[in-house]
Amino acid sequence: MTPVLSERPTHARHKVIVFAITLAILSYVSRVCISQAAPSMMRDLHLTQEQMGHILGAFGLSYALFEIPTGWLGDWIGPRRVLLRIVLWWSAFTALTGWMFNFWALWITRFLFGAGEAGGFPNLTKAFTVWLPLRERLRAQSIMWTAARWGGAFTPKFVVLVLLFMSWRWSFVFFGALGLFWAVPFYLWFRDDPRRHHGVNAAEAALIGDTGRNAAGHANVPWLRMLRSRSVWLLWFQYFCLTFSWCFYVTWMPDYLMKYWRLTPSQGGTFAIMPLFLGGLGCLVCGGISRRIATSAGGPRNSRRILGVAGFLGAGVLLFVSSRLHSPLFAMIAMGLSSFFNDLTIPPSWAACMDIGGRFAGTLSGSMNMMGNLASYAGPVVGAYLVGGNAARYPIFLAVMAGTYFIGALCWPFIDPVTPLDPDAPAH
């Protein structure tokens, strides 16, 4: 132990967080850009609002279907190779989106795009489980999700700027190329086991702890144990509720701003920043206050429950308020604050996957995100039929999403977010 104590720990694990941050930003840029381009695509390809709803939902459907297999694959062979494949795949299909010519071609391309991007966050969660000590995991999740939200927040304005210089078709090629600048440095630097990385010294390895056991390949996922777990079922259901309402911001919000409030694309792009920006702030605040709440509330189990319930209730109340306002500015402020409370729930949800899942964190987080992305398929489709081409009916859609938040709040008091499925894993 003397060599460990006599040297200062290196900080290689923090570079993993940097890679996660940049990948989170790129993933949201790649998925948000279509919502801003949707009006032009609908015009040029003669698509109805219901058809566009199915196209927007195709991503969520395939993303959901491939979350568990890709999360499991990361548990089995490690996140390094899986994340490389994910980024190369989504880059290709983002670029191909710009060259589709009718409803079915576009639907299939977006379905394949979602299949390729599936598993990104579960595999980043797997990397955190292996590379980070327990006390740093929730904060890392909060930082990563803040980056994701802020990347999505400024994408609409960025897309509007890009569309001034190129058509919507070439804009998808441009956004698809961005992933290549991440994939090569990540693959060259990252290792699935921090103990085998040249940048990790003995002191940092001791600080990280015995997480290398989580990096070992395996295929024996305890499915029955998961299916018998009340906490797992409730974790899945609350994430469905959370994503059903939140996905409005990356699908129908530009249409809502332009048709309900009659804003220009430039004005709409400016207003669209607010929900995702404040949502990212919610993730950041969650990471900053979670330890303090845990200290006063008796540990991370209670603090995560408190944050989960408060997040859902606050999001539901403020989203309903936004549907009753008569000013686009005040409506978007209320919607932005709703997103802030929504994202107080994100880090506890993913931290629960790490602690409950342990060496199966990729699979468990993949299954939770699968439920979220089933919601991201259902949300745009349900919204399209509720609105039905009549923008005056958008408040009905917002009220339905607010009600879904209230249902999600009922889950958290009954979730045990810290006790692992694996009885041999360390518990809090």
Image: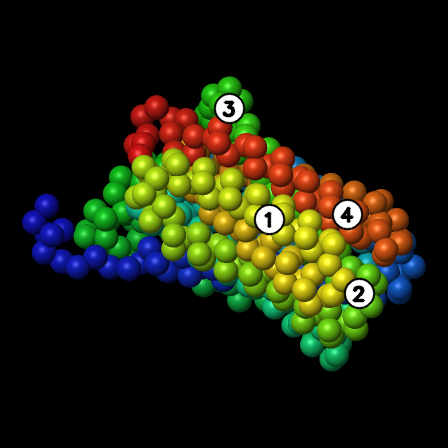
**Element type at mark 3:** helix
CA separation in Å, label 4 and label 1: 15 Å
Measured Cα–Cα span from mark 3 to mark 1: 24 Å
Say which quadrant the N terminus sits in. Answer: top left
For marks 4 and 1 on the same chain, the one whose residue lies earlier in the sequence: 1
Q: Are marks 1 and 2 in contact (CB under 8 Å)?
A: no
Counting from the top left corner in percent of width and height, residue 59 is at: 70, 48
What amino acid does circle 4 point to? Phe
Q: Outermost residue toward the right? A: 46
Residue 372 coordinates in the image, percent (x, y): 62, 41
Closest to the observer, 121 or 386: 386
Q: CA distance from mark 2 to mark 3?
A: 43 Å
Please give the residue where the numbered disc 2 appears in the rendered image.
Answer: 261
Mark 1 residue element:
helix
Circle nearer the N terminus (3, 1) = 3
Which disc is residue 315 wearing? 1
- Report if residue 89 is visible in the image: no
Name the residue located 35 percent from the left edge and 58 percent from the top edge: 14
Q: Earlier in the sequence, mark 2 or mark 3?
A: 3
Q: Is residue 414 left or right of residue 246?
A: left
Residue 230 disc label: 3
Cα distance, mark 2 to mark 4? 15 Å
Residue in the image at 64% along x and 58% along y: 334
Instruction: Determine the residue positioned at 53% across, 22% down.
Output: 227
Q: Which residue is mark 4?
A: 397
Q: CA distance from mark 4 to mark 3?
A: 30 Å
First in sequence, mark 2 or 4: give its number. 2
What is the x, y in percent for residue 332?
A: 67, 62
Three-letter code for the amino acid on which mark 1 is drawn: Ala
Q: Nearer the viewer, mark 2 or mark 3?
A: 2
Query: Looking at the image, is mark 4 or mark 3 earlier in the sequence?
Result: 3
